[in-house]
């Protein structure tokens, strides 16, 4: 029976598929307003109106956030003369639905398990497509093997491409075409799948990503690699034999997920770029191309990549991410995965005298914080307040919803609880705690979660969610996450609230240098708040909350952060004054923190004059020996004067590079 077409009444999304001109070179830019729309625009290039006349049409559907399945899925789409589209886990975006409706496929493949694309979504699709097939293994490696087996039903497999890194997998499309399945391997524990395969196996990437032992174990005969991802993509492209080129951002792979079908259909080799330039060898390859496709918007791949004469203007806002990125070219490489961060946290907590696992501490009771609250030295309300700043000097730190606490006891009227949290011991109001049992804890920890990435948002009930708050995920609904909030009391109780997905990310935010800087700059203009009082935060609270975005746990106080095991320590107690310290600082990673007596700042890199810059939440500085007290979070030069007419940088004793955790 003919299935009914998919119709979903949501708002319109505008996409771009335009032709640009770069001096003598014509190129076609394919982009959309989001990752889903970009995949749709590529699909329209792959399956035009004439090809839709074919009754045997197939769509491959992958999660646009947990995108690892999309990479081997592109080869499946090519082998089945189909296209690849992207979706959320729980609900298919309108633009994707519209494209499925346009294609009207007879087969639709779902890639990954139900954590990637939900069972409800699968059942819904079965109402509209005759044959829905899920290819989902217990992990990414097994899923790629299942996809490979499906490819063999459509094509005579001529070989296998093997990768472990996302960058190499994106670039593999140049060679994969429709008859070379892409197999993802765990370099530390490769499966036996490839051992029994007779076709040739080509490893993509250097020995640091796929070792010589793994190479031999799977029976590989060839390796294509380079000194970095860009050179590797160039070497893969040369091996493809294609005369056209598709440019894809080599740091942010969002737009490149569906590029494999474009590469196959348009016979275009995939060249990775940093978004602003090409190395000389890649440019030589590009200049020999017959046709050029640019995948993604200008923020992903600038026009100047095709035409170097098109020089990007210096951003006018000199405290913006774009400005500092222009002069410092922040890396988009993922430094550690979510799994690696969790393992690093566990090890660091076991070694640290400043951090705790509250639910592992022996205590009378355990609880989750139900609302943003401030942990105090003593069980007192508004005490020790500074009349000039409203800072509460009884405050120690801020606790956010779902933060864990071990309850050691109460004051006489039980209005205050003496608790141990992840980075402190002190007192919080009992009314801000939801008491939990071990079973409750186990249930919550098993759930998927989102992380707040905005500086702070306010819910309809008046509660606040700060950057780095982790919330159990119920579902994704269009542009919103539905999450659980704890309800204070002596029993486990939750309510569901809805937050915009522009304010949060599923899991942790990808841990990249660019994201660290972008997160830190969101706090500009926020009032200073000692110990998270004033509904804001202080200098070390600022550093902690930025890194909470990525799931990284660290000590709370300035002195503790400086002394603790987290991060690579660099000694800044050197002679030579500000000049010597500037020279040393410029060798360090932007995103590192500088520590001086009683204060910490984040290093941003240099400005257009080459002066090292910082962002920090601080109380005062000096101008010509006169104290100025802004009590604010702001971007400033590290040459800003501290007490005694010396600079903040001169006052620094230690740098901690939190981009290096092991």
Image: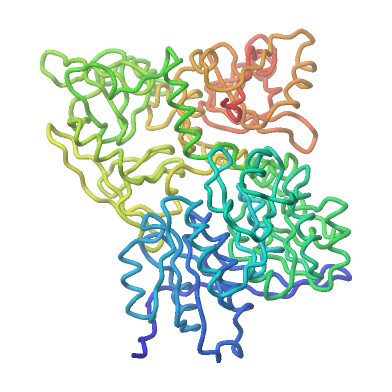
Residue 484 vs 245, above or below: the answer is above
Is there any visible trace of residue 528 in the rendered image?
no
On-image quarter of the N terminus: bottom left
Residue at coordinates 59% horizontally, 17% vertically from top-left? 595
Q: Quadrant of the C terminus?
A: top right
Residue nearest the observer in this picture, 526 or 275? 275
Look at 71% across and 49% down and name the residue there.
315
* 603 or 55, nearer to the observer: 55
Which of the two residues, 356 or 137, is positioned nearer the viewer here?
137
Q: Is residue 12 above or below residue 549?
A: below
Residue sitting at 27 percent across and 46 percent down? 484
| Residue 558 point in image, percent of width and height | 50, 17
- Residue located 69% across and 9% down the image: 573
Q: Residue 370: where, in percent of width, then height?
A: 25, 35
Q: Number of labelled discs?
A: 0
Q: Is residue 330 left or right of residue 543?
A: right
Residue 301 in percent (x, y) is at: 71, 58
Q: Position of residue 179 (x, y in %)?
A: 64, 69
Quarter-wise, where is residue 243 in the image?
bottom right
Image position of 153 with respect to 522: above or below = below
Visible in this render: residue 517?
A: yes
Q: Is residue 245 left or right of residue 640?
A: right
Q: Is residue 407 left or right of residue 74?
A: left
């Amino acid at each position: 029976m003919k299935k009914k077409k998919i119709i979903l009444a949501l708002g319109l999304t505008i996409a771009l598929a335009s032709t640009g001109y770069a001096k003598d070179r014509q190129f076609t830019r394919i982009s959309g307003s989001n990752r889903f729309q970009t995949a749709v625009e590529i699909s329209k290039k792959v399956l035009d109106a004439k090809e839709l006349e074919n009754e045997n049409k197939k769509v491959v559907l992958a999660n646009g956030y947990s995108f690892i399945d999309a990479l081997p899925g592109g080869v499946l789409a090519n082998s089945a003369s189909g296209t690849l589209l992207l979706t959320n886990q729980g609900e298919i975006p309108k633009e994707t639905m519209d494209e499925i409706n346009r294609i009207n496929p007879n087969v639709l493949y779902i890639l990954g398990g139900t954590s990637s694309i939900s069972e409800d979504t699968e059942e819904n699709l079965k109402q509209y497509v005759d044959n829905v097939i899920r290819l989902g293994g217990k992990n990414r490696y097994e899923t790629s093997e299942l996809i490979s087996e499906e490819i063999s039903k459509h094509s005579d497999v001529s070989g296998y491409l093997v990768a472990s890194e996302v960058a190499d997998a994106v670039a593999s499309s140049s060679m994969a075409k429709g008859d070379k399945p892409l197999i993802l391997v765990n370099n530390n524990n490769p499966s036996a799948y490839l051992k029994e395969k007779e076709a040739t196996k080509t490893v993509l990437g250097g020995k640091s990503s796929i070792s010589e032992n793994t190479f031999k174990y799977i029976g590989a005969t060839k390796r294509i690699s380079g000194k970095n991802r860009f050179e590797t993509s160039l070497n893969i492209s040369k091996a493809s034999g294609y005369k056209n080129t598709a440019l894809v951002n080599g740091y942010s792979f969002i737009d490149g997920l569906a590029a494999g079908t474009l590469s196959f259909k348009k016979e275009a080799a995939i060249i990775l770029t940093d978004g602003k330039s090409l190395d000389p060898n890649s440019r030589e390859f590009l200049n020999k191309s017959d046709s050029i496709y640019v995948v993604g918007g200008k923020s992903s791949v600038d026009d100047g990549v095709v035409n170097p004469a098109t020089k990007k203007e210096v951003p006018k806002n000199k405290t913006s991410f774009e400005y500092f990125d222009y002069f410092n070219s922040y890396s988009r490489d993922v430094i550690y995965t979510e799994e690696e961060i969790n393992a690093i946290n566990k090890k660091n907590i076991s070694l640290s005298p400043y951090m705790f696992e509250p639910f592992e501490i022996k205590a009378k009771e355990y609880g989750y914080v139900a609302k943003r609250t401030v942990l105090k030295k003593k069980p007192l309300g508004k005490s020790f307040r500074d009349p000039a700043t409203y800072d509460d000097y009884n405050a120690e730190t801020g606790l956010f919803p779902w933060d864990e606490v071990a309850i050691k006891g109460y004051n006489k009227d039980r209005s205050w609880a003496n608790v141990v949290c992840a980075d402190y011991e002190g007192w919080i109001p009992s009314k801000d705690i939801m008491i939990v049992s071990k079973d409750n804890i186990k249930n919550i920890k098993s759930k998927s979660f989102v992380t707040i990435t905005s500086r702070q948002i306010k819910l309809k009930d008046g509660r606040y969610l700060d950057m780095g708050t982790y919330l159990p995920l119920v579902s994704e609904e269009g542009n919103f996450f539905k999450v659980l909030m704890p309800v204070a009391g002596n029993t486990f109780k939750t309510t569901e609230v809805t937050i915009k997905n522009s304010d949060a990310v599923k899991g942790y935010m990808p841990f990249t240098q660019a994201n660290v800087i972008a997160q830190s700059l969101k706090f500009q203009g926020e009032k200073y708040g000692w110990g998270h009082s004033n509904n804001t935060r202080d200098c070390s609270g600022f550093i902690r909350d930025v890194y909470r975005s990525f799931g990284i746990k660290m000590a709370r106080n300035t002195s503790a952060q400086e002394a603790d095991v987290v991060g690579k320590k660099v000694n800044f107690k050197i002679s030579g004054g500000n000049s010597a310290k500037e020279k040393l600082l410029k060798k360090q990673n932007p995103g590192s923190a500088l520590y001086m007596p009683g204060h910490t700042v984040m290093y941003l890199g240099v400005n257009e004059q080459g002066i090292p810059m910082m962002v920090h939440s601080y109380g005062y500085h000096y101008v010509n020996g006169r104290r100025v007290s802004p009590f604010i979070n702001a971007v400033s030069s590290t040459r800003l004067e501290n007490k005694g007419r010396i600079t903040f940088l001169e006052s620094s004793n230690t740098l901690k590079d939190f981009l290096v955790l092991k």
